[in-house]
Image (cartoon, rainbow, N blue to C red):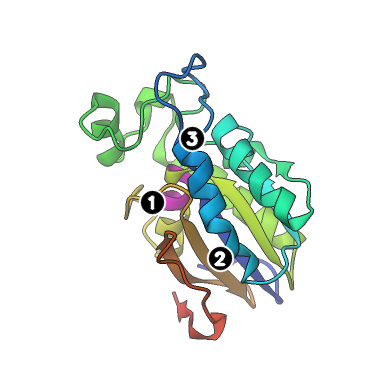
Amino acid sequence: MSSKGSGGVDLVLMRHGEPQRNDVNSRDPGLSDVGWAQVRRTLPYLMGGGPLAAIYSSPQIRARQSAGVVADSFGLAPALDDGLVEFDHGAPYVHYDDGSASVWQSYFAGDLSPWGLTLAEFHGRIRDVMTRIADRHEGGRVLAVCHGGVVNAWTCQILGMPDRIRVMEPGYASLHRYRRVEGRWRIVSLNEIAPSLSTLNYSSARVI
């Protein structure tokens, strides 16, 4: 997948930690106690990869709270970007691991109509926000805290599968690493989850 820019940028996507079940704010739940712990466990692996030029976050509470934990450790203020919101933004939240729910059966089939979206619209938004973030930070390493659907959509695009919406089940607080060199994106790693996480050498990245 090609994009603008001749320099290199390392993009790390992090899925938020586990959200609360039965949160009073059913449309935008915050992190559960387990979710907070998941994010904290991921910190050493993020910090081991070197400094971050910036931290971006979806404005949804579970992502903002996750980004805040990381931002405190790096001494950065997270920048909120609406382009990183999940496809279900504004709808009552259904846990991603509740795969039997009817709305998730639609998602697994690549149908985003229950959320008023088309596949092309969602892919277009994700492509735009990732390109915009990368263009701002050529030569740097940047983190975007977002959602499982966002991670999946971006990965599908880099793999050259814009007609698909899902290739994996991202773990809570998981890390997904990508690099753009001379306008071409490559996948470095997917779905790294503490405590099995490891810092990786970008020179071993697979070119897509």
Where residue 2 appears, as percent x and y from the top left, is: 56, 69
Where residue 43 appears, as percent x and y from the top left, is: 59, 58
> Closer to the camera: disc 2 or disc 3?
3
Q: Secondary structure at mark 1?
A: loop
In the drawing, what numbered circle is on residue 121? none
Residue type marked 3 = Asp
Determine crowd level at label 2: few under 14, some 14-19, many 20+ residues with C-alpha closer than 10 A.
some
Of callouts 2 and 3, the N-terminal one: 3
Q: CA distance from mark 3 to mark 1?
A: 19 Å
Determine crowd level at label 3: few under 14, some 14-19, many 20+ residues with C-alpha closer than 10 A.
few
Residue type marked 2 = Tyr
The residue positioned 57% from the left and 39% from the top of the image is: 63
User: Mark 2 highlights which residue?
Assistant: 45
The residue positioned 46% from the left and 17% from the top of the image is: 26
The residue positioned 46% from the left and 51% from the top of the image is: 151
Where residue 203 appears, as percent x and y from the top left, is: 54, 85
User: Which segment did they paint magenta?
Assistant: 149-153
User: Mark 3 highlights which residue?
Assistant: 33
